[in-house]
C-alpha cells in the first residue's frame, strides 16, 4: 500500500458526505451539521458545501466528562449524580 496523503477526521467526513451528493449542491453554501457521540467524546462539525468545494465552519469537541458536567451531571466513583 502506498499512502499518498493523510487527512484529518473532519475532512474525511466532509469528503465522504460531499462526494456522493455533488449534484444536489449549487453556488450558495449549504451548511450541514455532523454530530458524533463516541464513548468518551462528543464532536460537532458544521461544514458548508457548495458545488465546487466545502469549508469547515465549526469544529468542536468535548470530552464526555466535561460535557456531562456542563449540563449538570457529575460522575463520582462510578456513580452518576444529577444536580438540581
Image (cartoon, rainbow, N blue to C red):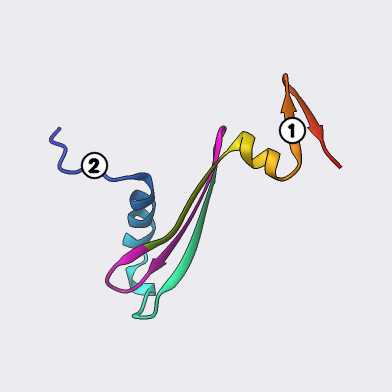
Dots 1, 2 in contact, CB < 8 A: no
In depth, the one of 13 and 79 nearer the eye is 79
Q: Which residue is mark 1?
A: 74
- The residue lying furthest to the left in this view is 2
**x and y percent of residue 20 in the render?**
34, 61
In depth, the one of 52 and 69 nearer the eye is 69
Q: How many marks?
A: 2
Task: Describe the element under mark 1 as helix, strand or loop.
Answer: strand
Say if 10 sits above or below 64 in the image: below
Task: Describe the element under mark 2 as helix, strand or loop.
Answer: loop
Q: Which residue is mark 2?
A: 6
Q: Residue at x 32, y 56 (%)?
A: 15
**x and y percent of residue 35 in the render?**
53, 51
Q: Quadrant of residue 83?
A: top right
Q: Residue at x 60, y 36 (%)?
A: 64
Q: Residue at x 72, y 19 (%)?
A: 77
Give the class, few, some or many, for how many residues have Cα within 10 Å of label 2's Cα (few <14, many ≥20). few
Examine the residues drawn in magenta and state their main secondary structure: strand
- The residue lying furthest to the top in this view is 77
Task: Specify the quadrant that holds the N terminus.
Answer: top left
Range of residues picked out in magenta: 38-55
Amino acid at each position: 500500500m502506498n499512502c499518498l496523503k493523510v487527512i484529518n477526521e473532519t475532512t474525511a467526513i466532509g469528503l465522504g458526505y460531499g462526494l456522493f451528493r455533488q449534484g444536489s449542491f449549487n453556488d450558495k453554501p449549504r451548511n450541514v451539521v455532523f454530530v458524533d457521540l463516541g464513548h468518551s467524546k462528543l464532536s460537532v462539525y458544521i461544514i458548508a458545501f457548495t458545488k465546487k468545494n466545502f469549508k469547515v465552519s465549526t469544529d468542536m469537541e468535548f470530552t464526555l466528562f466535561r460535557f456531562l458536567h456542563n449540563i449538570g451531571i457529575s460522575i463520582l466513583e462510578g456513580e452518576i449524580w444529577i444536580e438540581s
